[in-house]
Image (cartoon, grey):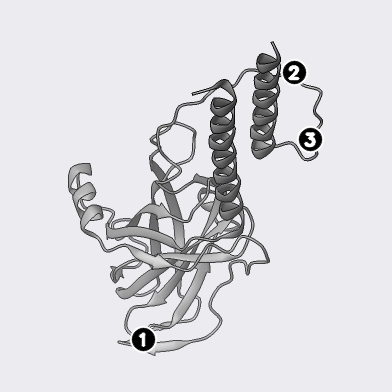
Amino acid sequence: MSLKSTTKLLTWVVSWVVLGLLSSTLMAETSDSPRASRSISFSANKEINKDIKDALLKQADAVILTPLVKDGFRTESNTAEKTTTHNSYSHSNEIWIYNATTILISDFDNDGFHHRFSISIDADSIYSSADVYAKLYLSFEGGPWNFYASSQDYPIHFDSDQDSFTIETELAQGFPAGYYDVRIELYDAHTLEWLLNYGPYDDPSLNAIPLEDSNYDDTYIEIAYPTIETGIVVAGAGSASFWWIVVAVFIGAARRYRKH
């Protein structure tokens, strides 16, 4: 094969590679993938080892959710102002969350952002027994709240610290690396009525949690590209612009080699 044919072939290959990179970059910027997560819930006072939790989480059905909403405003926490009655106890600011605890569990690539974490909730009541469940939401760096998990039903008793429950979650898809706030919504397990919200302004452990999904949280190899000195000025230089520079330098070098 002649030098001219080789140059044409290599130029064609590099051009297609660049076009592929550009198209994938544009798709990543303009398309929103659905979210997916897996969650389990359990009483916090039960001793469950990590192997069992790993197995339960793998067996849990993945919840497919709408794409993450990042832009806009969010409603902050507020307490229940209505009263409902069931099974001899009533709710009118008579059930509350004493505190919440966040535990970060898995960070494969050691970049500080975790794809697996848990939220433990200690809810109290003025009554001897009340059954509740929780819905959990994530806010990406101050954006709107996005639902991601629910708990099972759990009984709470007065101000006992032995009735806490935990929701452990693995983010599988659709959660870019960032700092997320968590909001807890507590509901009556019998009537399904909303009782109260509890969020980052109520508890600092629910504020600015470093999270990402497991697609982001993976091992990677950082490639150091050599600095290339050229006379080409590219507007809006970024990752795509770099490859155009590589193409230009390659073609120029091939032409100079052919002349000599």
Q: Which mark is residue 234?
A: 3
How many marks on residues? 3
Q: Give the residue type at disc 1.
A: Thr
In this view, the residue in front, 242 or 111, is: 242
Question: Which amino acid, mark 2?
Answer: Glu
> 221 or 42: which is nearer to us?
221
Residue 41 position, x and y percent, is 29, 60
Residue 197 appears in the picture as rendered: yes
Q: Nearer the viewer, mark 1 or mark 3?
A: 3
The residue carrying mark 2 is: 229
Q: Is residue 224 above or below residue 129?
A: above
Crowdedness of circle 2 by 10 Å Cα count: few (<14), some, many (20+)?
few
Residue 197 located left or right of residue 251: left
Question: In the shown orientation, is residue 48 left or right of residue 234?
Answer: left
- From mark 2 to mark 1, how far is it between C-alphas? 69 Å
| Dot placed on the residue nearer the N-terminal end, 2 or 3 | 2
Q: Residue at x 39, y 60 (%)?
A: 36
Crowdedness of circle 1 by 10 Å Cα count: few (<14), some, many (20+)?
Answer: few
Q: Position of residue 63 (x, y in %)?
A: 35, 65
Give 216 or 121, whichever is nearer the viewer.
Answer: 216
Q: Which residue is mark 1?
A: 191
